[in-house]
Image (spheres, grey):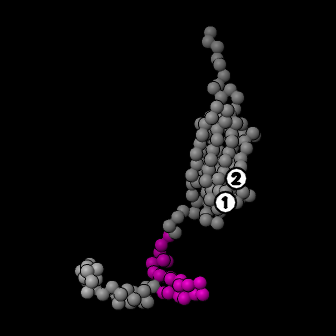
Amino acid sequence: MSRWSRRRRSLWPIDFEVNISGLVAGEPFSIHLTPEGVKAEGLRRLRRHVTPSFPEEREPLVDVIEMEREVKVVAELPGAEKDKIDLRATEERLTIHAESPYGRYHKELELPSRVEPKAVRATYRNGILEIHLPKKEGGTGEKIPIE
């Protein structure tokens, strides 16, 4: 008997190969052989009471970069199609909503500066949405004379 097998037997007090075959073939698991390979369906009773592990609507990862003349927002929307992205801007807020086969994305941002919503430009390539929001002129406010 090799040193490895002696060590293994001391870690596993039961005969692992015999017992594992009984667990896999019996309840609560059910295994089906398909042309593509093995498809396992398990824990049927438990599955009825379990909710999905990911939420239906997720927040995309977003970077907000304030530059001298514009605010740049970069959002990751993997799997979303360009025509399924809804982008809305006001002077102070940006809303991103998108749908993909993996779920929905939603994010509302308060912008660091007031922007011109009618001059916003956006591009979408390879799951990355890049939004350029030009800052509103006079973003520092009106100068008030003191009497």
Q: Residue furthest top?
A: 147
Mark number displayed over residue 124: 2
- Mark 2 or 1, which is nearer the eye? 2
- Residue 41 in the magenta stretch? The answer is yes
Across and down, in percent, residue 51 comes to 50, 70
Residue at 64% over, 14% down = 145
Residue at 45% over, 78% down = 46
Residue 37 lies, with reference to residue 120, above or below; the image says below
Residue at 39% over, 89% down = 21
Please give left or right for residue 103 compared with residue 46 in the image: right
Across and down, in percent, residue 105 comes to 61, 57
Say what amino acid the circle numbered 2 marks. Tyr
Q: Give the range drawn in magenta.
A: 30-51
Residue at 47% over, 81% down = 42
Q: Please give the residue where the numbered disc 1 appears in the rendered image.
A: 80
Total marks placed: 2
Q: Which of marks 2 and 1 is nearer the N terminus?
A: 1
Dot 2 falls on a residue whose secondary structure is strand
Distance in Å between CA atoms under marks 2 and 1: 10 Å
Q: Quadrant of the N terminus?
A: bottom left
CB atoms at circles 2 and 1 under 8 Å apart?
yes
